[in-house]
Image (spheres, rainbow, N blue to C red):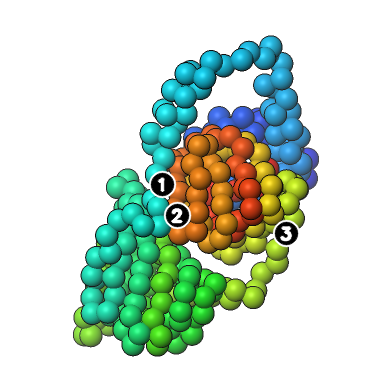
Amino acid sequence: MRHPEPSDEALELAALYALGALDPDQAAAYEAHLAEGCLSCRAEVRTFVAATRLLGHAAPQERVAPEVRGRLFARLRADWTVVRSTDGPWEAVGSGMTVRRLFRDPASQRVTALGRMEPGASHRSDRRADPEELYLLEGDLTVAGEFLRAGDFCAAPGGTIHTAISSQRGCVFLVHGSDPDELLDESSPLRPQPELVFVRASEGTWRAASSSGVKWKTVFVHPARGTVTRLLRMAPGARLPEHRHVTPEQFYMLEGDAHVTGYVLQPGDYYRAPAGTEHGVTHTEGGCLFLMIASKVEALE
């Protein structure tokens, strides 16, 4: 529902959202409402976000002792996950295919992993219990008859049954989906399937963020989960302001360097912060490019 004029309830929701006071389900539902195009609510959120940024200046500034700052960052980072490009074993899941798990969320039973297929390899059919997203990092991959190259993206709705995927020259991909999926044998009936979403590397529009030197391109939006999958490109010296994500924030480094609250991330590194995490400025020295799956952040718009 769109509001031609914001009601008292709409104003209250906008204020609570800007303060980060909504629980994850409420926030996801409100973000879905904003995504529907309610211009009055969007305007109120921008106003409240601008106001909340000034709240911290109302209190006198105090210098924090280095040891206190160190303990604070240690506590913040305790729940974060960083997997370096060289961390973790590759596990065989079939002939010619291996997987390296980056993170598994036991609550949602969703996993983020790297997949690798040898030239000529194929993987048998399975049924996705939950929506799955795949970003091709290297090589080629054929999914449902569609030939993908590096930088291409595929999303499969929940309940989708894939025919076997295959690779001619070999490939490496990043995948985020349910774990485990239901493996099917050749006798399993194939019912009409939801359409897969394919986004080619050349498709989509790069948009300038509010932060100087930062551009983003939306790849996929999942309103039910309240998440947006985006590519973010930061020019050398660019900075992202402090922000908070309602859902977990995770990204995979594709190029360059990114500095996130004490971590220096390089190509092939993976980072994840739990839902509701607030963190300081993210910056880059030499510039970077990464794929991010997280809730919408007004500061990027």
* Residue at 33% over, 87% down: 120
Q: Which mark is residue 269?
A: 2
Give, as a three-letter code, the residue at label 2: Asp
Image-based side of 103 in relation to 9, left or right: left
* Residue at 23% over, 70% down: 92
Is the C-beta separation of discs 3 and 2 under 8 Å? Answer: no
Q: Work out how far the residue at label 2 is from the one at label 1, CA to CA, in angstroms.
A: 7 Å
Query: Residue 21: percent from the left, percent from the top?
Result: 55, 30
Q: Which mark is residue 82?
A: 1
* Residue at 73% over, 59% down: 207
Give, as a three-letter code, the residue at label 3: Arg
Which is more toward the observer, 221 or 14? 221
Q: Work out how far the residue at label 3 is from the one at label 2, CA to CA, in angstroms.
A: 25 Å
Q: Residue furthest front?
A: 286
Q: Work out how far the residue at label 3 is from the one at label 1, CA to CA, in angstroms.
A: 28 Å
Query: Residue 222: percent from the left, percent from the top?
Result: 52, 58
Q: Does residue 13 sit above or below 147 in this rendering?
A: above
Is the C-beta separation of discs 2 and 1 under 8 Å? Answer: yes
Is the C-beta separation of discs 3 and 1 under 8 Å? Answer: no
Image-based side of 4 in relation to 52, left or right: right
Q: Does dot 2 land on a helix, a strand or a loop?
A: loop
Image-based side of 228 in relation to 182, left or right: right
Q: Does residue 218 sit above or below 171 in this rendering?
A: above
